[in-house]
Amino acid sequence: MRVNQPKESVKKRPPRKNLVALDGTLDAVSRMHLSIWEKGKEASPFEVRMVHRDAVREHVDRSNPFCYNGGICLGDLLREMVCGRQEEFIGTSFCTGQEGDPEDLGPHPSCATRFEINATLRFR
């Protein structure tokens, strides 16, 4: 009799560096307000708010348990806004991950999770 062994857990990626806090991106910002809502299958019903520069994260993870290597890069958006001195952003970013078991062969569908973002920056 053969017993099915449980699969070992999928190796998670190493923690990402919070470059937006280290590279001086927000040095020219005097006030900020970020609101992020996750939408889609298995999405978290909660809003992520950031109003302090020290609380800003480079990467925002997703809640979809079927997705791997997903989330959005908030740091890239903030760097673009600061570079162009853009004070308002209302838009949608899509998860960069894929759904399914990364150890299985074959194409994996893109994660259907999206993030609605409302960002306000005030410059010095």
Image: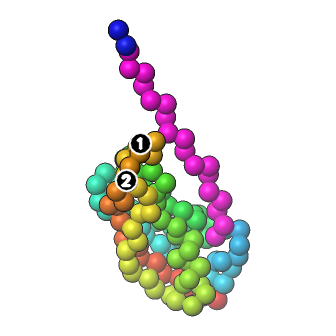
Percent across and percent down for residue 33 are: 49, 75
Location of mark 1 (residue) = 104
Q: Residue at x 37, y 54 (%)?
A: 107
Location of mark 2 (residue) = 108
Is most of the magenta stretch helix, strand or loop?
loop
Q: Residue at x 66, y 67 (%)?
A: 19
Q: CA distance from mark 1 to mark 2?
A: 9 Å
Q: 97 and 118: which one is in front?
A: 97
Q: Which residues are magenta?
A: 3-20
Mark 1 Cα within 10 Å, few/some/many (few <14, many 20+)? Answer: few
Q: 6 and 92: which one is in front?
A: 6
Q: Is label 1 in a helix, a strand or a loop?
A: loop
Using the rendered image of the protein, determine whether residue 110 is visible from the camera's viewpoint: yes
The three-letter amino acid code for the residue at tag 2 is His
Mark 2 Cα within 10 Å, few/some/many (few <14, many 20+)? Answer: some
| In the image, residue 32 lies in the stretch drawn in magenta | no
Question: 86 left or right of 116?
Answer: right
Q: Are marks 1 and 2 in contact (CB under 8 Å)?
A: yes
Using the rendered image of the protein, determine whether residue 63 is visible from the camera's viewpoint: no
